[in-house]
Image (spheres, rainbow, N blue to C red):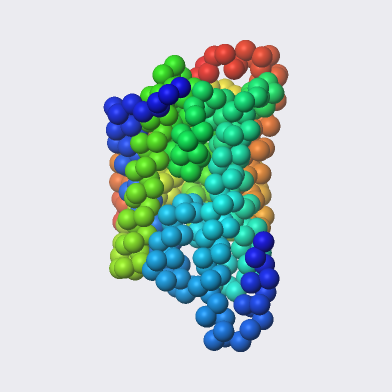
Amino acid sequence: MSSPTGCRGAARPRRANLEISQLLIWALIFVVGAINFAARLSFIALFARREMPPLLARALRHVPAAMLTAIVVPAIVFAAPGVLRLDIGNIKLIAALIAGIVAWRWRNTMLTIAVGMVSLWLLQRFVS
Amino acid sequence: MRTHFSRSAFIEGARDMLPMTVGLIPFGIVCGVGAISVGASPVSALAMSMIIFSGAAQIIATQLLAAGAPFAVVVLSCFVVSLRFLMYSAALAPYLKPVNHRWRNLIAFLLTDQAFASSIRRFRESPDLRGSVSYFVGGGVVLWAAWQIATIAGIVAGAVIPASWQLEFVVPLCFLALLAPLLHERAALIVFVTSAVAAIALDAMPMRLSMICAGMAGIAAGVIADRMSGRGATAESEPGN
């Protein structure tokens, strides 16, 4: 990979560093872009012509619930990076709980967003 | 399969993705502003969004560049953040067998948390693969376009949306709208609890490794739950139950 570029850039004085940064940024765009595309294509390409092991296929059924949780929960329970807030003072947590109940009951994205955002705005206005 | 395009499913996918784009605008703006602030030209800042097309990777990359991290560290961090795509790719793979390689490449390029989450249920439950593929691509294209528009807004106008609007909260709400209905099923509830506890407990891990680790923990718990209820072997043939 192009780590030598990075090392040279880091070792040089500031002005040279700025000149090289455009090249560095373009290199980063293409390297990270390629890595992202490879990760996205990986198993789609791998299993295009062969059978998936049954255990893996079963495990993959749980990907949506597992990953959605891993994305959503930290976005709600941390008031700031590393600051866990599981009390009613965390307005995002309260708004998400209300929206979650609506989503669970009615399965409607627009309604969930509307209820969640209005709850958050109201809580922001009147609680904090 | 010769063609994979159904216009009505494409439009349906595009329409269903619109609420999500509202929440992504603040992130796209942050990516545009961030790239400019670390010395990217307007063209390369936009190229970053067009080619990488991953908010998490772009935000981490610009933060690390701003902190003066070595190139290899930036690349490694972006790689770790993209590990979740391996799971999405694997989860979609069984449905994409009959799809030709051009469409597979297009689907891979447009594969994001949002596109995966909003379309996986349709891939599982609908027998019409052409419709599912078109639905996915419709949502993916709207998301990609919105991402570029938001990035341009960030490059040209800077942080134009007041933070107090909290528009970025729409993103977790959209995911919540897809997650909560899954929890009617017992196994999914076990997955949810495990993944949630793990995500909180592991939050201090570097490079956002907590996200992928929490996801893996949740999947493992789901597999164990299937085994214990003896549904494992039949679960595949009755998705959605």
Residue furthest out toward the front = B2
Which of B166/A91 is in front?
B166
**Residue at the image point whose x is 56% and y is 64% from the top:** A27
Total labels drawn = 0
**Image coords of residue A71 (percent x, y):** 53, 45
**Image coords of residue B209 (percent x, y):** 64, 51
**Image coords of residue B224 (percent x, y):** 70, 25
Looking at the image, can residue B52 be seen? yes
Looking at the image, can residue A65 be seen? no
**Residue at the image point whose x is 52% and y is 68% from the top:** A25
**Residue at the image point whose x is 65% and y is 24% from the top:** A50
Is residue B177 shown above or below A29? Answer: above
Is residue B132 shown above or below A109? Answer: above
Which of B190/B54 is in front?
B54
Judge from the rendering whether residue B34 lies leftward or rightward of residue B68; answer left or right: left
Is residue B137 shown above or below A6? Answer: above
Which of A100/B74 is in front?
B74
Report which quarter residue A28 is drawn in.
Answer: bottom right
Judge from the rendering whether residue B38 lies leftward or rightward of residue B225; answer left or right: left
Report which quarter residue B213 is drawn in.
Answer: top right
Which of B167/B51 is in front?
B51
**Image coords of residue A24 (percent x, y):** 56, 70
**Residue at the image point whose x is 55% and y is 77% from the top:** A20
